[in-house]
Amino acid sequence: MKAQKTVHVCSECGYTSIKWLGRCPECESWDSFEEELRSPEPERKATPVGNNRAEKLGELTLPQYIRATTGMQELDRVLGGGLVSSSVVLLSGEPGIGKSTLLLQISSELGKTRKVLYVSGEESKGQIKIRAERLNINSDSLYLLTEVDIDSVISECERTKAEVIIIDSIQTMSTQHLSSAPGSVTQVRECAMSLISYAKKSGCSVFLVGHVNKEGGISGPKILEHMVDAVLYFEGERTNSYRIIRAIKNRFGSTNEIGVFEMGDKGLREIPNPSEVVMAERPKNTSGSCAGCVMQGTRPIISEIQALVTKSAYATGKRTCDGFDYNRMCLLIAVLEKRMGLRFYENDVYLNVAGGIHLDEPSADLSIAMALISGITDKVIPDSVIAFGEIGLAGEVRAVSHIEYRVKEAVRLGFTKIIIPKKNLQSSIKVPTSVELCGVTNIYEVLVHMLPKQ
């Protein structure tokens, strides 16, 4: 009998080496190799060829993917309309962000129509029961299991005939067929593959909770994200009550949607209108503040951009940005310095997007530029003004997409002056008579609309 051997496996891509390497030659990650003890694989006998045959594409029928609501419209939006049968969803987030709370809440709602098996490898049944009582959850169709052996978990899934399985977390699962420790690349890959195979065979839906590493990515092999049907990130600061779920992969829906929640004493509460929540705390008559609108999938979200410009104590001004791309902010500052002669280089610039929302599309350029101009000139932008548009290096304001949705959301929240690119005025936008649509072609024309009417 062959003895066990020691190998080194890259935790990022799964590359195997007989010796430790400082840098992975496959994915070029530094200090990612972990030592594993492997048993020799048994000799494989030749198996007869199966009856699986190729079929013509035109003769195939469309699969009937049945969606079931999770009880949370915000999560359904991110999933593309609901939880799909036979699908495997990977939910990742920082410790303490609320992953277990979210899954326990949707387990209660799904348990009204389906059998749900909640498997925990980190907490005892008593700990889960305490959280369930705090969230006021009590369902006869919700089963709890504390187990780390994946073979025992699948056996219990078959016995209970669970239709929804929640694994908290995949890094704690292991199989006795492998000698490596739980959480290693091999264990995570094999346990996930066993659950995926069971989901496709039985038709149940599976939620996998994934830990994050120090860089913010999902722990374990990168192939784990390719194996599952959807990858969701649960984001937010633990000191902030707001949480955001966004999809970075979804085989059954869009990856541009987000779901917004608020963490409270009774668990997570949905925020169907995040624009109203963010703008409700907006300060009045304050310079450096401007409202903007970005699209998250099909949802327009209005947020407040705050800019603070102060005299620098050093030869070079400091730049700080939160909620927006730092390099994009520096580009906009350079355009304002060159085209308008504003002396930002003598000042420290602090930019913040209120509410913890990240603006990642060019339509936020115009509102950010207006907030910067207001901050350095100390001129107050009227609270009734909102702006969105892309700014080029020549100072021109370019058109943006989904202009009708943005304008409609701005009108709903009570804005009476909407500054948009002049190119977008050619669209058939209908607004009430009390609302003024202002088209601009460059940042010079914006100055006229920033000041209140005398």
Image: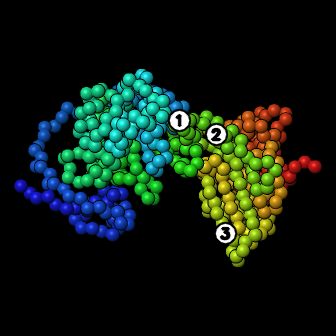
The location of residue 356, given as percent across then percent down, is: 61, 49
In the rendered image, residue 258, in percent from the top left (x then y), is placed at 55, 41
Number of other residues with Cα within 10 Å of mark 3, as a class: few under 14, some 14 to 19, many 20 or more: some
* Residue at the image position 36 percent from the left and 34 percent from the top: 118
Q: What element carries label 1?
A: loop
- Which numbered circle lies on residue 274? 2
Judged from the image, the secondary structure of the residue bearing numbered disc 3 is loop
Tag nearer the camera, 2 or 1: 1
Left of 87 or right of it: where is 334? Answer: right
Dot label at residue 318: 3
Residue 293 visible in the snapshot: no
At label 1, the amino acid type is: Lys
Residue, far right: 454
Label 1 sits on residue? 266
Disc 2 crowd, CA 10 A, few/some/many (<14, 14-19, 20+) = many
N-terminal of the pair, mark 2 or mark 1, is: 1
The residue lying at 6 percent from left, 55 percent from top is 1
